[in-house]
Amino acid sequence: MRLSKTARGALEAEWDRYRWLWNECVAKSKAVHLHNQSTGEKRTCGPVQLAAMLTQARARTAWLREGACVPQQQVIRDFGKSPAKALKDIKARMPMRQRAGMPKYKKKRDALPTLEYTRRGFRLKNGRLHLAGQIALRVVWSRDLPAEPSSVRLYQDSTEAWYASSVVPAKTEHLPETGEVIGIDGGVRETATTTSDDHDLVHAQHGRAAAQRLARYQRMMARRQPNRGQAASKGYREAKRQTAKLHKKVARQRQDTGHKWAKRGVHDHDALAVEDFRPKFLAKTTMARKAADAAISATKTALIEMGRKHGRAVYLVHPAHTTMDCAWCGARTKHALPLSERTYACTACGAVSPRDKNSARVMLARAGLQPV
């Protein structure tokens, strides 16, 4: 979004109210929780009670009344959904000593602004986004909306740029059938190796190209880092912004590369067998930086989303033993191949092929597809 000084100030003021209300909800819920623990009572502090408190707070606080009620009511809804979700996620991932079922406070210097408006709180007119509270925003549309949005979320990223994200019903845009299928194997030497030589995705190395500039900005941050308890200087904030801007550029380059490759693969094939590769373990190896720069998960996500958009069949294949099986006869080697060995030779049928190409053909076999 291209914001004027007035619009930016209005959004920041709404965010201050949002953050204050969220922190008040956290404080009230914690107070009720401690009271129940000490007295044994079973008081509740759910969305109904918090909504009543919001009405009372708006009646006696002029600063709160100046803001629109729609995003403030959305704070209550978001807070009402967060404890259950937090408990579910925390119990699944966090150790016992770190578990907590209560949402945390949103600190001014740490939390990035985000506001959500339901259908009653916004409207689109002449390409502009009009929000409750007489806030008019000029939006640079990335594409035409296929339908009337049911909600819109405004948020600011680490580069201090504002964006609007709309929720619209998804529509499938079917493509003509080609009669082709493809198997895709993820890796580090190449981001994606396929059964078709024309659709292999080479490692673009966007992060490596930006490493020198990134190191420069990080050294600037290290030199200008404020002492504990002191406010950050203008030079430190600028170096931090430049660092975030460069990180954002690299992320967009990776996303653009994966999106274009996925679009070409989906347009040329009716069915795609993709390795369900989860490169989390690579973060503990010497290939961690190169694997992160390859953006394997982001590329796989782009392929799945593109296949869903155009009605193509995308099969996720379990990656176990894909480098040990023979794509021609199905025999499995007795030991795992080291990464340095890039050629697969089957001892049963004698087939010899590049290791990643063999794995890509294994994807097709496991998905029940046969290459044309």
Image: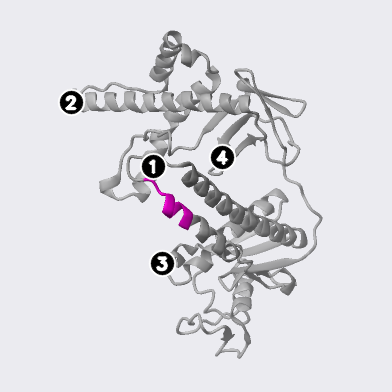
Q: Amino acid at mark 4?
A: Glu
311 lies above or below 123: below
Residue at the location (58% across, 53% down)? Answer: 246
Label 2 Cα neighbours within 10 Å, binned few <14 / some 14-19 / many ≥20: few
Image quarter of the C terminus: bottom right
Question: Along the line of sight, which residue is nearer the eye, 74 or 257?
Answer: 257
Residue lying at 46% horizontally and 57% vertically, measured from the top left: 219
User: Of the residues tagged 2 and 4, which is closer to the observer?
Assistant: 4
User: Cα distance, mark 2 to mark 4?
Assistant: 44 Å
Nearest to the observer: residue 266 or residue 10? 10
Q: Upstream in the sequence, badge 4 or badge 1?
A: 1
Which numbered marker is on residue 88? Answer: 1
What range is drawn magenta here? 219-226
Distance of mark 3 from mark 1, alpha carbons?
Answer: 27 Å
Q: Which residue is mark 2?
A: 38
Looking at the rendered structure, the secondary structure element under dot 4 is: loop
Q: Is residue 288 left or right of residue 99?
A: right
Q: Is residue 225 magenta?
A: yes
- In this rendering, which labeled residue sits more in front, label 2 or label 1? 2
Q: Which residue is mark 3?
A: 284
Which of the two discs, 3 and 4, sits closer to the camera? Answer: 4
| Contact? badges 3 and 4 (CB < 8 Å) | no
Q: Amino acid at mark 3?
A: Lys
In terms of secondary structure, where does tag 2 sit?
Answer: helix
- Does residue 107 show up? yes
Measuring from the top left, give residue 178's x and y in whole percent: 80, 62
How many angstroms separate mark 4 from mark 1 (CA)?
A: 32 Å
Q: Position of residue 103 (x, y in %)?
A: 37, 34
Do callouts 3 and 1 mark residues in contact (Cβ within 8 Å)?
no
Say whether marks 4 and 1 touch (CB < 8 Å): no
Q: CA distance from mark 3 to mark 2?
A: 45 Å
